[in-house]
Image (cartoon, helix red, strand yellow):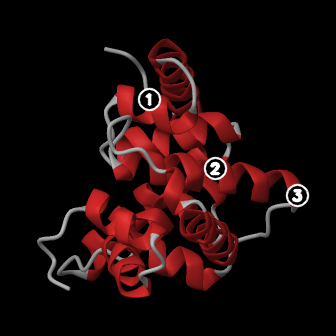
Amino acid sequence: MRDTVGDAQLMRLTAEGDAAAFRQLLARHLPRAHAVAYRVLLNREDAEDAVQAAFTKVWANAGRYEPDRSAFSTWLYTIVTRACLDRARRFKPKTQSIDDWAEALSDGAPDAETQLSQQQAAGAVRAAVAQLPLNQRMAVALCYFEGFSNAEAAQSLNMSVKAVESLLVRARRQLKTVLGVKDD
C-alpha cells in the first residue's frame, strides 16, 4: 500500500478489517500520538499504555469514523487525550527516570556548555509544565508542542475554543510565575 492513500481511505479499509491499512495508519500517526501522550502523562510507559489503548479503540471503532465530520488526526487525538485522562485517573503517575529526562532533553547541540544550558532551560520548562493541572497540560501539549490550532485542540479535547483559550491563558500565567518570567 502506498503512502499516497489518505487517512480517510485507510480508515475505510481498516473498518473492513484490512490490517495492512491499519498498520499504515499506525506508522503514520504513532510517533506523534506517543509524543502527545508523553507530554501529557510525563512518563514513557504510561504514554505507551495510553497510546496502545487509543489505537486499540481506533481498530475496534474504525467503522464509526466519519471523515465528513473531522480530520482523522482530530478524531485520533480525541481518543488519545481521553486515553491519557483515563490513564491519569486510574493510575498514580510514576516518577520519571533519568532515562526519560535524557531522552526528552537530548537536542544534539554541538558543544557541551551550550547543550547543558539548553538542557537546564528545557528541564525547567518541563518541570513547570509538569506542575500544570492535567487539562492545561493537554491543551499546552496539543497547541504548543504539536502545533494544533485552538479549534483543533478544542475538538480533540471535546470542549469549546474559548475553554481551550482559557486553559492556555491560565497555563501561560502559571508557567510565567513558576519560571520567574516578568511581563515587559
Instruction: Looking at the picture, tell me which residue is in the foreground, 6 or 154.
Output: 6
The quadrant of the picture occupied by the C terminus is top left
Q: Residue at x 65, y 59 (%)?
A: 41
Tell me, yes or no, whether the two marked residues, 3 and 2, touch with CB atoms within 8 Å.
no
Residue 27 in the image: state x and y as whole percent.
Answer: 34, 80
Residue receiving disc 1? 181
- Whole-angstrom CA distance, mark 3 to mark 2, is 18 Å
From the top left corner, tell me how far across and down residue 6 is, in percent: 21, 62
For label 2, the SS is helix
Distance between mark 1 and mark 3 Cα atoms: 34 Å
Q: Are the residues tagged 1 and 3 within 8 Å (C-beta)?
A: no
Q: Which of marks 3 and 2 is nearer the N terminus?
A: 3
69 or 134, nearer to the observer? 69
Label 1 or label 3, whichever lies nearer to me, is 3
Find numbered disc 3 in the image and state the secondary structure of the residue it sits on: helix
**Disc assigned to residue 130:** 2
Q: What residue type is labelled 3?
A: Arg
Residue 168 % position (x, y): 49, 25
Query: Does any portion of residue 143 appear in the rendered image?
Result: yes
Label 2 is placed on what type of residue?
A: Ala
Figure quadrant of residue 157? top right
